[in-house]
Image (spheres, rainbow, N blue to C red):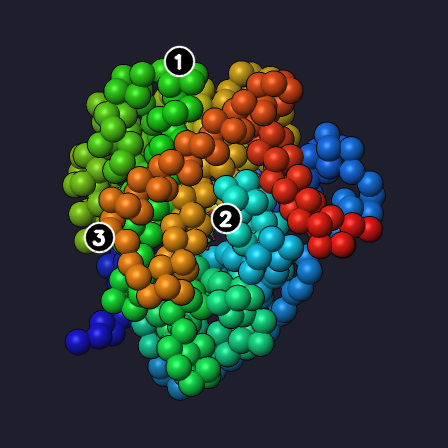
Amino acid sequence: MAPTTSPLADAAASAPHGLETRPSAAPRPAEPTPLADARVQLAEAVELLGYTDGLHQMLATPRRELSVAVPLRMDNGESRLYLGYRVQHNFSRGPAKGGLRYAPNVNLDEVRALAMWMTWKCALLDVPYGGAKGGVAIDPRQHSMAELERVTRRYTSEILPIIGPERDIPAPDIGTDEQTMAWMMDTYSVNSGYTVPGIVTGKPIALGGSLGRASATSRGVTHIALAALRHAGFEPARSTAAVQGFGKVGADAARFLAEAGVRVTAVSDQYGAVLNTGGLDIEALTDHVRETGSVVGFPGADALDGADLLTQDVDLLVPAAVEGVLHEGNAADVLAKVIVEGANGPTTPTADRILRERGVLVVPDILANAGGVIVSYFEWVQANQAYWWRADEVESRLEERMLNAWRHVLGYAEARDLSLRTAATALAVERVAEAHRLRGLYP
Ligand SMILES: NC(=O)C1=CN([C@@H]2O[C@H](COP(=O)(O)OP(=O)(O)OC[C@H]3O[C@@H](n4cnc5c(N)ncnc54)[C@H](OP(=O)(O)O)[C@@H]3O)[C@@H](O)[C@H]2O)C=CC1
Ligand SMILES: O=C(O)CCC(=O)C(=O)O
């Protein structure tokens, strides 16, 4: 029988009574925003590549943006109205691709930034997509499964004119999951008159999803984290780590790191953090989160302030929650020597500069968390061919692509004395600009 509440709503319903969300970091100084951060990163790459202002403008500007109103009839009969967005930043290399986020603070500028990062990520990993992102400004924890289904179907209907397996292919992001993708696929298919599995990725396996997609981002983060630790002179089996965010990316990243021998000493979620310097039992912690809805109160650890997670004395820090958590107000206090960005946009340009000056190796989001879109690409290929691969095939192809990209970015950065972020962005931007040039769109 179909469940009547979502896993997210279940978690909220069972969260310890009175638990409040906590800031993910010490308060970030007022501006800039993720969009400003993304634009600074692009400008640095453009300067390095010596591009014209016209090409810079072309690369900076989303090709298509749609804002939609999403009315919701609540279970109690009341009505609400939510705002939703889909931004297609670029499709010069193929259909636009990127996740759908449900979070209360979603806004158009944030979605624009996330869409731009998707363009660079897809180009860097050489998957044949452009970049897109979507969002609805809604807190999924405040809604029943039935309400989330209605919101998802309505949002999908509103953006239907601009999505499609050859146009723009959504996937899960913060606050959405494979059930969300199943509703999107059904809504699109009903409107098409036939089943279109290639319209979304991150679907349930039973609907044509790929083995290995659910854990792909975290596996990719782990491949990169182990390579980066070794590059920085750390033996993973003697290293320690802290992970911010215990959702789809953070929880599995903590598990895979622990399986690789890394001592994961601290993790956090919206409600707070937990610390055990001897190493957290990630399996027991996962059970605790399933039962209570939060890492807070885990009996095998001490309580820690969420903001303090980022400044723990560990070798590796994996921010895997939201943007802008490492900023000029806390970058100097970070003790980790390696940062691997599971989240999109967790480090501001000012923090990047401070961390680089302090010798901290920052592996940027567009490389570190690309495992998700790589296996989304595999899923789309499998769905379009109606032929599915074994889990070990998916995982070995994922590892090969991640490590090839790591070596490529590292080599480019070292040859030019660049940060990994500037190197990765420049490599990606160059590929997108080349596509523009070949298609005749060079201004
Ligand atoms: N899912 C994917 O395949 C990919 C995701 N990403 C990026 O990874 C990051 C996490 O996404 P994902 O794991 O999918 O999302 P989830 O919704 O599954 O998990 C998000 C996690 O972050 C925590 N969190 C949310 N807001 C805050 C906050 N303000 N402060 C502290 N913690 C917070 C949540 O806490 P709580 O559990 O209490 O809600 C949760 O643990 C995002 O930046 C996303 O864009 C990047 C590539 C692919
Ligand atoms: O799997 C995808 O298509 C995109 C995942 C995503 O949103 C991201 O990489 O940020």
Q: Is residue 229 above or below residue 208?
A: above
Measured Cα–Cα span from mark 2 to mark 3: 34 Å
Q: Is residue 46 left or right of residue 80?
A: right
* Residue picked out by circle 1: 233
Q: Is residue 190 above or below residue 294?
A: below
Sequence order check, earlier mark of 1 and 3: 1
Measured Cα–Cα span from mark 2 to mark 1: 31 Å
Number of disc labels: 3
**Amino acid type, callout 3:** Arg
Q: Nearer the viewer, residue 70 or 404?
A: 404
Measured Cα–Cα span from mark 1 to mark 3: 36 Å
SS of the residue at dot 2?
loop
Pick the quarter of the image with the N terminus: bottom left
Q: Is residue 83 above or below residue 246?
A: below
Give the label on residue 127, or none: 2
Residue at the spot 39% in from the left edge and 25% down from the top edge = 227
Residue at the spot 53% in from the left edge and 76% down from the top edge = 160
**Amino acid type, callout 1:** Gly
